[in-house]
Amino acid sequence: MFAHTAWAAEACAPHIDSVRAVRATAGAGPEAPPPIDGWQPVTLPDHWAERWPGFEGIVWYRIDWQRPCAGRDDAPQLGVAFDYLSMAGAISLNDNLLWRDASLVEPLSRSWNTPRVFFLPAAALNPGTNTLWVQVVGGSMYGSGLGRVVLGPAVEAVAYHDERRLFARVLPAVNLVISITLGCFFLVLWLMRRQEVAYGWYALSAIAWLVFASNTVVSTLPWPFASTDAWSRWITAWMVLYVSCFCMFMWHFGGQRFPRLSRALWTVAALAVAAIALLPQPALSVATLAVFIVYSLLFMAVCVQFILRALDTKKTEHLLLALCAFGFLVAAVHDALMILRVIDDRFGYTVVTAPLIMIGMSLILAGGFTRSLRRVENFNDDLAREVRGARTELADTLSREHRLELDNVRLHERLSVAHDLHDGLGSSLVRSIALVEQSGEALQRPQYLSMFKSLRDDLRQIIDTHSGGAAPVAATPTQWLAPMRHRFGRLFEEMGVRSHWQTPAAWPCALSARQVLGLTRLLEEALANVVKHSRARTLRVQLMADGEAGVLLSVEDDGVGFDAVTVASSIGGLGLRSMQARMARIGGTLQIDAGDGGTRLEARVRAPVMGAGGS
């Protein structure tokens, strides 16, 4: 099929007489002249696989055409435009070489997707019949042959060439630029947010498409391949990878997980790539065609599957991507049928639709990413408000806890003062009262003065304790116990109570001043209870070592005893509760055994070891 130019003078229009083709002689190289015999008429565009199946080598095309009105001054400049040569070739006008590919031997140049236009100089034209010689080097499995040829005025040849170049070179290059840009962009997004798996698969599919398309529609140089077969294996493998990644992207974007199907997909992909890489030449063409058909059908199937998925979910992003998938589907069906030569069309749809659809897909993905960021920002704002509210609530809670703690400290100090007054000053009062009661005659002034001084000393000790002062620990247990033994000893004698006091020569362990004071208060309260309640005849006070790191203070009498549980829970059990609280504060324990045979009180305190002794 040829396009003829309508000149202003129809009689001067060039017209083609015939187009013929012939296979080169076996063993002939690119420099050999065309054969003389064997020429067959053909119609352009021509793919010699239909005429010579399985042939690989050189085919010559001869285009004979007439140039009427030769030599006229008003004859326009002539030009000729070629749609494509596949795979490589050379073009001559009569005996003048117009152009030839860089490599007409393996590895071949790849001019199959490159339109060309030439001006035909008048000096190179014959007055009557002229011949265009086209030498094409290729093979049946690559669809080798010669495309359309437009012969006429140069302006019309250039216009046809520019149109073909737009669809064959410019738009595919734009497609690749968009693909690599978007692929890199979404690859970075995926690296920053690994949970967005769909972005990662989209980036991989874009990169695979870049490698596949750049080696099929952009690059014309044979480098880096050692042969055309190696190039064919390479682009087929990348087609398999592209379709597989595209399937994974569509499934993940649709929120679908097909573990078994995914494993099967990649298993088949690995087998297909291995077959393409390892099969020998006789089987390579069949395997390549089979892989092309199977993965084209797979591409179409996943587009249909996602469209059905979008109609089911009715999500906006799914419906928009389904629209893009429908565009892919239409273009893929058309171009696959065109490549398989089921339909005859000059232009493929993919070069036009792919850039627009990829931009649409990228806007959809970017919109989804933007919504995710917006949700994150809203979450951060909500979190900030919650944190501010929690901070305010925490501050109020801490303030309340601080006030409660101050109240507890004050209450604790009041209880401590009450216990000290009860155990210290109270026991002195009890002792003084008992002394007055037991005295058979009126007490003299010095005796009263001695009692008052004792009360004053106890009160001063309490005041010093709660104002931060700390009395030093007596050098020995005997010195610590002597004042108490003196104060209570006379009283016990007048009451007829035999008292026995036993202490070690040195402290069994390193008691602190606070612990010694606690034991003092506890002993005063215990002795006061003996005076008030026990009616005992015998009393034994004993201080001794308790194991390797402790001291035991024991107070035992043979009085009437009491019910410790009942007394502790009654209103009058303040002294008992005071002793228990005091021992807890100094890290000690208190055990009371009371019954009809008397009462035994044991107070244990743990402290660092100093030494041991007794008297």
Image (cartoon, grey):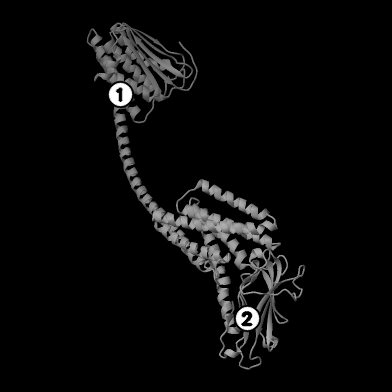
Q: Secondary structure at mark 2?
A: strand
Which quadrant would the C terminus be assigned to in this image?
top left
Amino acid type assigned to the residue bearing label 1 in the image:
His
In the rendered image, residue 497, in percent from the top left (x then y), is placed at 31, 7
Residue 187 shows in the view: no
> As rendered, which of 462 and 592 lies closer to the eye?
592
Depth check, front residue: 197 or 58: 58
265 sits left or right of 409 in the view: right
At 70% from the left and 86% from the top, the residue drawn is: 124
Q: Nearer the viewer, residue 294 or 408?
A: 294
Assign a secondary structure to mark 1. helix
> Is 454 above or below relative to 314?
above
Estimate the x, y position of residue 47 in percent, counting from the top left.
63, 69
Give the x, y percent position of residue 394.
Answer: 34, 43
Residue linked to disc 2: 80
- Of mark 2 and mark 1, the one earlier in the sequence is 2
Based on the displayed image, in which of its 4 quarters is residue 135 positioned?
bottom right
Q: Is residue 408 above or below residue 575?
A: below
Name the residue type under label 2: Val
Residue at 59% from the left image edge and 90% from the top image edge: 11
Distance between the Cα atoms at labels 2 and 1? 120 Å
Q: In the displayed structure, does residue 206 sit left or right of residue 372? A: right
Q: Residue furthest bottom?
A: 73
- Which residue in the structure is indicated by mark 1? 419
524 vs 297: above or below? above
Q: Nearer the viewer, mark 2 or mark 1?
A: 2
Question: Relative to 405, does residue 215 appear above or below in the rendering?
Answer: below
